[in-house]
Image (cartoon, helix red, strand yellow):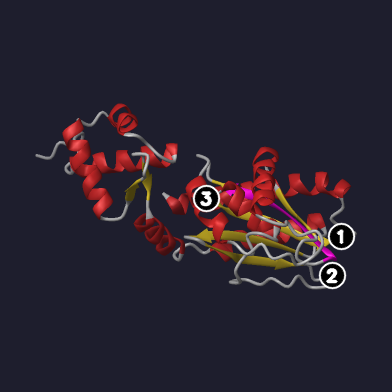
Amino acid sequence: MIDEGRSQVPALDRAVKILSLISSKRSCSIQDLLQGTGISRTTLYALLGALAKAGFIRKRGDGRYMLWTALAILGAQARENIDLKGIATPFLEDLVRSSGCLSCYLGVMDGTRAYFAVKASNPNGAIMAKSDEGMDVDLVHSGMGKCLLAFCDADLRERLLPTLDYARITRSSVPGQRELRAQLEAFRKQGYAYNDSEDDEEIRSLAVPVFTSKGALIGAVSAVGTVNHVTDKKIWELVPLMRKAALGIGLAIEPFLK
């Protein structure tokens, strides 16, 4: 008779404990893992070796363990089974109506690539926002890109920052990596990001992160409008509306991530 109170695959349960703890802390030392999982040192080292060989974790130069690319690949495959458009469109359309912006988007990170996953446009807009679903997100010059970069995993952000194109598009474009780093730090503190006419003199955009209930980043919601609409004063009206949409999308997507 099977004892339903005991796991039939204890090694798998321990591996899941390791991955969950690393995920919650972003990175873990051996001591963190010993204390947080209760796994013996010998068994822990064996499991860490197996997980690293499979590409689920990676040992950094400082000896701490972080999640690695095999999980990102599995995550991307899982996202393909999520109807992001069906989930996000009602929230984005409501945001377009309540904000009066030209377009609203849901953007996501897929490994090192960021892209616009879902778009809702204002049928009464005088002009059309140029970004469409499936297009890459500019991580330097767009509100969406800056938001995803600001709130993504710190190790991923550090890998991406030196590789980005900092060529200025307008007079307002961020001039380099140092200035972008300062912006990202400010965005993390205030909880939203913006593009102040940095890729088009006539356009501004705002973006807020979309999180799970446990604080894991799902993506970002952005609202794009003209400089006459997205004014400094208007930002304080738009950000709460965007956060409401981001919360709704996050809660709707989260069950598919379990």
What label does residue 158 carry, if any? Answer: 3
> Which callout, 1 or 2, points to the residue nearer the camera?
1
Of residues 146 and 160, the one nearer the viewer is 160
Q: Pinpoint residue 145: horizontal percent, then vertical percent.
A: 64, 58
**Position of residue 248 in the picture relative to residue 200 (left or right):** left
Residue at 47% across / 60% down in the picture?
Answer: 111
Q: Pinpoint residue 255: horizontal percent, then vertical percent.
A: 47, 50
What label does residue 227 carry, if any? Answer: 1
The secondary element bearing badge 2 is classed as loop
Total marks drawn?
3
Question: Counting residues from the N terminus, which is met first, the one under dot 3 or under dot 2?
Answer: 2
**Identity of the amino acid at label 2?**
Asn
Residue at 21% across / 49% down in the picture?
Answer: 50
Residue 53 lies in the magenta stretch = no
Q: CA distance from mark 3 to mark 1?
A: 31 Å
Q: Pinpoint residue 184: horizontal percent, then vertical percent.
A: 65, 47
Is residue 244 visible in the rendered structure shown here? no
Residue at 34% across / 30% down in the picture?
Answer: 32
Question: Counting residues from the N terminus, which is met first, the one under dot 1 or under dot 2?
Answer: 2
Range covered by the magenta-colored residues = 201-210
Residue at 30% across / 33% down in the picture?
Answer: 30
The crowd level at tag 2 (other Cα within 10 Å; few <14, some 14-19, many 20+) is few
